[in-house]
Amino acid sequence: MRSLFDWNIVSLVGTESILRHAVDGSLQDMLGDATAFFVEWDVLLFHKLLPGVCFFHEQEIAKTFDDPAQKDNLISKLAHQAAPFLAPDYGGRTHLVWSNIQPNLPDTVNNVTPWDTFQLTAQRHANVTALGRDLFGPETSFSFLTVANDVAPELIGAPDVHVIDLPRSPEYEGPPKLYDSLLTGIVARTHI
């Protein structure tokens, strides 16, 4: 299922913001407010109440965002993507994954979202973990995938923090099937 975190660029600040709005029940109304969206650089969509979130793959909608039909399309799409956060009723355990390892991510977000908002600090780790458990239940588990330069030293070695040895580069994915193998490993570990 696609969610707000798929196909959008969402920093840890943005992740925390989405989860906080979901927990306090304001996410649906906030995403339904067309007046809160704005376009930058003619093709990038942002929301006034979601710092650190760029609706990066909505460039066609952004180009003609003055058209009310485009606003309706965006709101409808985001309502669908937000569904897992609006009324989480999954009976099993939830495992949330956050990653900033995409090799070209710092270049991609340059001038869009400050890179430091993508770095895993102890406070962001604590906030996202607490909010995720408030929303999806106390058994919710996490995997934070990061590189050594983008994580607080005190988090290295934490059971839910996975430091990946992957250099930054202009490439999108890095080694072939990298994400498949990482996610397969996460699924295997969480079902033991």
Image (spheres, rainbow, N blue to C red):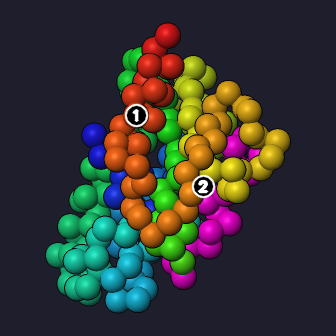
Q: Looking at the picture, does residue 189 appear above or below residue 163?
A: above
* Count of residue discs: 2
Instruction: Provide residue 2's location: percent of width, then percent of height.
Output: 30, 46
Numbered range of the magenta stretch: 111-127
Q: Residue 125, located in which quarter of the rendered image?
A: top right
Per the model, the C-alpha gap separating discs 2 and 1 is 23 Å
* In-image side of 33 versus 117 (left or right): left
Q: Residues within 10 Å of mark 2 (few under 14, many from 20)?
A: many
Give the residue at mark 1. 181
Give the residue at mark 2. 12
Residue drawn 40% across and 34% down? 181
Residue 181 shows in this picture: yes
Looking at the image, is mark 2 or mark 1 earlier in the sequence?
2
Mark 2 secondary-structure assignment: helix
Q: Quadrant of the N terminus?
A: top left
Instruction: Provide residue 15's location: percent of width, then percent of height.
Output: 55, 53
Instruction: Provide residue 156's location: percent of width, then percent of height.
Output: 74, 39
Tag 2: amino acid: Leu
Query: Is disc 2 in contact with disc 1, using a CB cutoff of under 8 Å?
Result: no
Q: Residue furthest left?
A: 69
Residue drawn 29% across and 63% down? 75
Q: Return the residue nearer the eye: 19 or 114.
A: 114
Residue drawn 31% across and 68% down? 57
Q: Residue furthest right?
A: 154
* In-image side of 186 versus 160 (left or right): left
Residue drawn 56% across and 73% down? 113
Asked if the stretch drawn in magenta spans residue 124, the answer is: yes
* In-image side of 161 versus 98 (left or right): right
Tag 1: amino acid: Ser
